[in-house]
Image: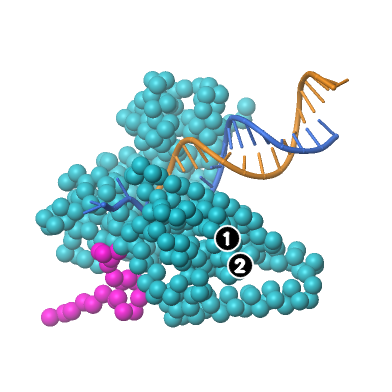
Chain colours: A cyan, B blue, C orange
DNA sequence: TCTGGGGTCCTAGGACCC
DNA sequence: TCTGGGGTCCTAGGACCC
């Protein structure tokens, strides 16, 4: 039995992030209810504090709250991921002023490993307030910080911080137990909608109940993941932050269609476009895929639900758009059933690997002709990427993607804010009188 | 009428081999 | 002929996260 070293983790989380971003350039909306909708103006994905207070639930279908918009009771935005990504990058860069050991966990969250900073309890408080105040001052985004001796406990602390202010330190055992006793088991990081009732059947209703069970019993009846969760809640360190972002293993591009699609031609243009976008991302990452998976489905909310997907491998790993489109459409032809109203399609590039190492392995076996043709393909893709990054998305497309200039014709985005921070045409204008 | 998008990890079960 | 254990690899499905 080894004595585990004392560790300290922090979790920074931006409050109502997407809604806060939208408020940044709209001072008139301060203290007003604001919600942000999902990609297709489908459901609510972010709510300002004021929107939460008037009872708009997370994930609410837009059509159910549209009356509030019409009555002027809430301000609605379509999602503007370029803006959110840009603001997120600024915040994450700033955070590294306090510690380089951060893991950007999501667009609005970052873990910090503070073990080496040797912060006593007084300095921990100063540390948290310093960060929240400075980030608010420099970016305008309100953030919360939680501190704990494991990542899971930092997450718990952050949850408490949001409820009781902006900062919370549960390093102290007594504080930790008090907070855990108040936290419903379903709100613990790693307990989702299926595990919650399963725990509750065993009278595990709070985080404190969960912390009190035998980890080995949990492993036997649940899995190793939940065993680690129990240990982490007790301050036993199982999870570590990853300061370098892990390479993606797959790239998924999928969309719901605003109006259902029935004909093969339209559906195939979408699938080709999704494949092209996925390939572009892979090339940006410097990766190649070993195969592609295509999925289509009709509306879940109708009786005749049809859902089908299939995968196919490539002869050699690639991110070459025409090759991937060709394979993806081959799959789509197998999956497509006439007289169905398709609501959604997705394309996933599978088993991504580093392009350079695949290239150096393959080159040994290539003939001169295949080597030349591969080089030509790469140059073509580079040219396509350059044109599209210089002149805007879809400046050049492949024939199978369709020539419809509005790639979003099938999706709705009626309430989008300008790209204030990423487009010269959309720079906010300030006037002095 | 209108219901998001993009990821990861673990497990169970089957195929196959020795 | 039948029987058995143990290992690996793959896939589908299920769970979670934001």
Q: Mark 1 or mark 2, which is nearer to you? A: 1
Q: Chain of mark 2?
A: A
Which image quadrant for residue A364? bottom right
| Neighbour tally class for label 1: few under 14, some 14-19, many 20 plus, Cα within 10 Å | some
> Residue, x 34% and y 31% (percent of image)?
A184
Residue A155's x, y, as percent? Answer: 40, 41
Q: Secondary structure at mark 1?
A: helix
Prevailing secondary structure class for the magenta stretch in the rendered image? loop
Q: Which residues are magenta?
A: A413-433
- Left or right, residue B2 beside residue A356: left
Q: According to the image, label 1 marks what residue?
A: A330
> Do the dots labelled 1 and 2 sit on one chain?
yes
> Residue, x 58% and y 75% (percent of image)?
A381
Q: According to the image, label 2 marks what residue?
A: A323
In the image, residue A154 above or below residue A291: above
Q: Earlier in the sequence, mark 1 or mark 2?
A: 2
> Residue, x 45% and y 65% (percent of image)?
A265
**Foreground pick, A407 / A110:** A407
């Amino acid at each position: 039995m080894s004595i585990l070293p004392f560790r300290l983790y922090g979790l920074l989380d931006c409050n109502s992030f997407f809604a806060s971003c939208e408020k940044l350039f709209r001072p008139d909306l301060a203290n007003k209810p604001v919600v942000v909708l999902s990609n297709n103006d489908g459901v609510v994905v972010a709510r300002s504090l004021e929107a939460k207070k008037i009872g708009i639930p997370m994930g609410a279908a837009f059509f159910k709250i549209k009356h509030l918009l019409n009555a002027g009771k809430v301000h609605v935005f379509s999602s503007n991921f370029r803006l959110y990504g840009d603001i997120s990058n600024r915040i994450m860069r700033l955070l590294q002023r306090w510690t380089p050991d951060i893991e950007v966990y999501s667009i609005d969250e970052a873990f910090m490993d503070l073990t080496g900073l040797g912060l006593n309890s007084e300095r921990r408080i100063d540390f948290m307030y310093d960060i929240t105040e400075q980030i608010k001052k420099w970016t305008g985004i309100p953030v919360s910080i939680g501190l704990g001796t494991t990542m899971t406990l930092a997450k718990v602390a952050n949850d408490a911080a949001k409820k009781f202010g902006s900062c919370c330190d549960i390093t102290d055992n007594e504080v930790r137990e008090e907070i855990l006793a108040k936290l419903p088991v379903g709100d613990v990081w790693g307990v989702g909608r299926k595990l919650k009732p399963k725990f509750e059947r065993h009278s595990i209703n709070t985080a404190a109940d969960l912390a009190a069970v035998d980890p080995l019993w949990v492993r036997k009846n649940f899995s190793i993941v939940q065993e680690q969760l129990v240990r982490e809640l007790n301050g036993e360190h199982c999870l570590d932050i990853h300061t370098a972002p892990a390479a993606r293993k797959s790239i998924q591009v999928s969309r719901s269609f605003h109006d259902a699609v029935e004909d093969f031609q339209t559906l195939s243009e979408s699938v080709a476009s999704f494949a092209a976008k996925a390939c572009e991302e892979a090339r940006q990452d410097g990766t190649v895929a070993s195969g592609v998976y295509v999925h289509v489905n009709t509306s879940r909310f109708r009786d005749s639900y049809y859902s089908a997907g299939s995968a196919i491998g490539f002869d050699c790993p690639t991110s070459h758009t025409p090759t991937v489109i060709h394979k993806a459409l081959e799959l789509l032809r197998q999956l497509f059933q006439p007289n169905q109203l398709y609501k959604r399609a997705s394309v996933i590039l599978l088993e991504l690997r580093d392009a350079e190492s695949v290239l150096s392995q393959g080159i040994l076996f290539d003939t001169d002709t295949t080597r030349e043709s591969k080089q030509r393909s790469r140059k073509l893709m580079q040219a396509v990427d350059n044109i599209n990054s210089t002149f805007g998305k879809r400046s050049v497309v492949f024939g199978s993607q369709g020539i419809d200039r509005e790639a979003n014709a099938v999706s709705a985005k009626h309430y989008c804010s300008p790209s204030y921070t990423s487009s010269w045409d959309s720079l906010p204008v300030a006037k002095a009188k």
